Image (tube, coloured by chain):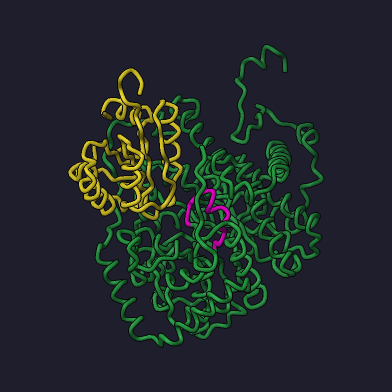
């Protein structure tokens, strides 16, 4: 706790089988540098493992990094599990090479923001700082 | 140069942190180590190329990476590429196959046939390579974690079609150590993973002596954030780790080293890349001859595939990637690569369209047919700049290798996550430099155009692929001789547990239509699973 406000805790996860972790690790470093508590899951975590970690670690942000194109099926599953575990208040962001035409669908599923490749790191930091409770 | 003039130009450093002078002359070459290491093409230390006549005799092999959906769709793309003049195949597998899962595995859902071709059993290979002459077109399998199984399946397929495996050419990527650093399709812990690479090398040395069982990849290490010197140094350390392992198992250096090959990255400064390859070729030859006492020049050859450099391509203004691809191809040709594969311009978004794949092929064909790149060997040799840089790069690569050895070697550094951590820190710093404008990327942080329409057409993904693959797999499980499959899988498990070479049992198993997932599960039962160290 600092200044009465809870520290921002972020779970950054690599769901599915995608092994591209350069971007995820860069975001982890940027968020750590911004002063957030960051837990990085490592590769190949199932939606169940991710949501369970989010509960166990009591995070206020879940970030998913997906570059394999399977973002929609993965996020459908994540959404269902987040609801099941009462995580509706957790800020949910998705990053990776997500085509523009899929951003809306991810937002409909409940993602609070979608950050494509090329997003300035500061925008991710600012978004979390402004929206994580 | 007077001090006044000196102040006129800003200092320039390449990515490998070598200061670049505005003008080079003969004394720079002398000061950096001289000209004695240049030699002649086809002769030790092979700075100028591994063959005497290089492309004058035969242009590089053109081998675009391809594969998606079901084996039928991949077979169609293969035939399209061959019809357009491609001279080799480079197979992309979907992620479930790459990590040893069947299409019906719960963890595979959503991923079947997405980033490459789905393969469950030998049947899928039979379909994928139907109508393709495996003597005419050499096949490269981009497979690592599950490499032993897929190499076994390729041999089984070839044998079934009447080819003599003893004469079969081709390559498997099968470089597991780099998968722990970047790319991430590991399955087993580090030590048994190296043992499996060893199994494939030993098996091929005895049974498939023309097949290249390993292509050591600096490529993905560079893509993960390494600079060009580290790319070469870590790749060489990895290759040495495999060599040491195989020597420990009793083979002589010249019984297998000639079949090791390499895969390198291209993006970045043109001269730095050319010097990197010339320096790398020389250093590798010296290592194999000097440290391993090889007496066969072929063992000393740095045979390589190059041309790709996904990290250099951009999602912004994707058509610029056509231009970048053409320069990467030029660099590869100036560097004396054996095989070339370019990243297509739409690859930052999607699986390459037919059009994008064709443009990549045409890019290489234009170099061959119109630009005179095949006329003379190592055309940059003798340039004061290139020779100086070649000397300097060699020294730097050697220094990074020595430092890593002094710290306990690459295997330990990978197992503990030190290399991963160091490289990801560099990737972060590089992005920060890009964001601050200290390095320039056209269309990204300079020469931007506002909100251009995305010009790339997305490769359609057929959701039904998964159901169709599962149906085929279930059909095969019902039809095959399951007593034989069980016996074969028991042998895989027994050989793995007993520390024996698993390749013969794996080949038997896939030949009886055991699936990739079934064979991999036996290996996991024996070796366990890798637990990724997370370090920042």
Magenta span: B173-185
Please tell me which residue is depicted at 51% across the width and 44% down the height of the picture.
B224
Please tell me which residue is depicted at 76% across the width and 47% down the height of the picture.
B38
> Is residue B88 visible in this depiction of the protein?
no
Q: Quadrant of residue A17?
A: bottom left
Please tell me which residue is depicted at 35% across the width and 53% down the height of the picture.
A46
Relative horizontal placement of residue A106, taking residue B505 as reference (left or right): left
Name the foreground residue: B341 vs B230. B230
> How many labels were placed on the picture?
0
Q: Quadrant of residue A33?
A: top left
- Residue most toward the left? A108
Q: Colour of chain B?
A: green
Task: Using the image, determine if residue B139 lies above or below residue B2.
Answer: below
Q: Position of residue B365 (x, y in %)?
A: 49, 57
Q: Colour of chain A?
A: yellow
Whether A106 is among the magenta residues is no
Q: Quadrant of residue A82?
A: top left
Task: Using the image, determine if residue B58 lies above or below residue B391.
Answer: below
Q: Position of residue B99 (x, y in %)?
A: 44, 61
Relative horizontal placement of residue B439, taking residue B276 as reference (left or right): left
> Is residue B366 visible in this depiction of the protein?
yes
- Residue most toward the top? B4
Relative horizontal placement of residue B17, taking residue B428 as reference (left or right): right
Name the foreground residue: B473 vs B383. B473
Name the foreground residue: B102 vs B63. B102
Q: Position of residue B400 (x, y in %)?
A: 68, 41
Quarter containing the N terminus of chain B: top right
Q: Position of residue B320 (x, y in %)?
A: 40, 41
Whether B182 is among the magenta residues is yes
């Amino acid at each position: 706790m600092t200044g009465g406000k809870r520290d921002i805790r972020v779970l950054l996860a690599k769901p599915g089988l995608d092994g591209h972790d350069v971007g995820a690790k860069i975001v982890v470093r940027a968020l750590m540098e911004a002063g957030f508590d960051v837990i990085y899951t490592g590769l190949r975590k199932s939606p169940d493992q991710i949501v369970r970690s989010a509960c166990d670690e009591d995070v206020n942000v879940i970030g998913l990094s997906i570059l394999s194109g399977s973002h929609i099926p993965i996020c459908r599953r994540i959404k269902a599990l987040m609801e099941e575990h009462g995580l509706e208040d957790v800020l949910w962001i998705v990053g990776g090479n997500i085509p523009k035409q899929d951003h809306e669908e991810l937002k409909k599923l409940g993602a609070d923001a979608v950050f494509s490749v090329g997003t300035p790191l500061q925008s991710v930091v600012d978004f979390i700082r402004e929206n994580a409770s | 140069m007077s001090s006044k003039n000196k102040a006129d130009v800003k200092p320039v450093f390449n990515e490998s942190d070598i200061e670049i002078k505005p003008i080079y002359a003969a004394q720079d070459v002398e000061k950096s180590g001289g000209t004695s290491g240049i030699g002649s093409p086809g002769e030790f230390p092979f700075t100028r190329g591994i063959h005497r006549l290089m492309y004058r005799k035969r242009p590089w092999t053109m081998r675009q990476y391809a594969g998606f959906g079901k084996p039928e769709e991949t077979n169609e793309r293969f035939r399209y590429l061959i019809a357009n003049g491609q001279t080799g195949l480079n197979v992309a597998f979907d992620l479930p196959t790459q990590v040893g899962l069947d299409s019906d595995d719960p963890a595979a859902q959503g991923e079947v046939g997405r980033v490459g071709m789905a393969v469950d059993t030998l049947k899928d290979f039979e379909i994928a390579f139907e109508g393709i002459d495996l003597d005419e077109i050499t096949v490269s399998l981009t497979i690592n974690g599950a490499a032993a199984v897929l190499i076994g399946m390729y041999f089984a397929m070839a044998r079934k079609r009447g080819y003599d495996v003893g004469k079969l050419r081709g390559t498997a990527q099968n470089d597991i150590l780099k998968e722990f650093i970047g790319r991430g399709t590991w399955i087993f812990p580090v030590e048994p993973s190296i043992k499996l690479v060893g199994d494939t090398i030993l098996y091929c040395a005895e049974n498939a002596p023309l097949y290249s069982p390993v292509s050591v990849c600096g490529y993905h290490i560079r893509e993960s954030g390494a600079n060009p010197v580290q790319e070469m140094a870590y790749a060489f350390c990895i290759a040495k780790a495999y060599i040491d392992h195989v020597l420990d198992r009793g083979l002589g250096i010249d019984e297998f080293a000639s079949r090791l090959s390499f895969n390198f990255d291209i993006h970045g400064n043109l001269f730095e890349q050319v010097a990197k390859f010339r320096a790398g070729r020389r250093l590798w030859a010296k290592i194999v001859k000097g440290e391993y006492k090889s007496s066969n020049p072929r063992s000393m050859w740095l045979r390589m595939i190059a041309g790709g450099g996904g990290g250099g391509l951009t999602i912004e203004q994707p058509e610029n990637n056509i231009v970048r691809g053409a320069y990467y191809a030029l660099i590869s040709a100036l560097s004396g690569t054996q095989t070339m594969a370019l990243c297509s311009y739409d690859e930052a978004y999607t699986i390459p369209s037919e059009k994008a794949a064709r443009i990549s092929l045409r890019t290489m064909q234009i170099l061959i047919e119109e630009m005179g790149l095949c006329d003379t060997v190592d055309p940059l040799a003798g340039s004061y700049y290139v020779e100086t840089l070649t000397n300097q790069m060699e020294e730097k690569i050697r220094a990074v290798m020595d430092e890593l050895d002094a710290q306990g070697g690459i295997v330990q550094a990978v197992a503990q996550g030190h290399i991963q951590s160091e490289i990801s820190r560099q990737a972060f710093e590089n992005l920060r430099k890009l964001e601050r404008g200290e390095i320039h990327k056209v269309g990204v942080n300079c020469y931007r155009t506002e909100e251009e329409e995305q010009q790339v057409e997305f490769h359609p993904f057929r959701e039904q692929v998964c159901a169709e693959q599962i149906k085929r797999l279930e059909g095969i499980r019902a039809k095959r001789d399951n007593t034989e499959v069980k016996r074969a899988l028991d042998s895989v498990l027994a050989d793995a547990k007993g520390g024996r070479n698993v390749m013969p049992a794996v080949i038997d198993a896939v030949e009886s239509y055991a699936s990739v997932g079934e064979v991999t599960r036996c290996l996991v039962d024996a070796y366990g699973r890798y637990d990724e160290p997370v370090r920042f």
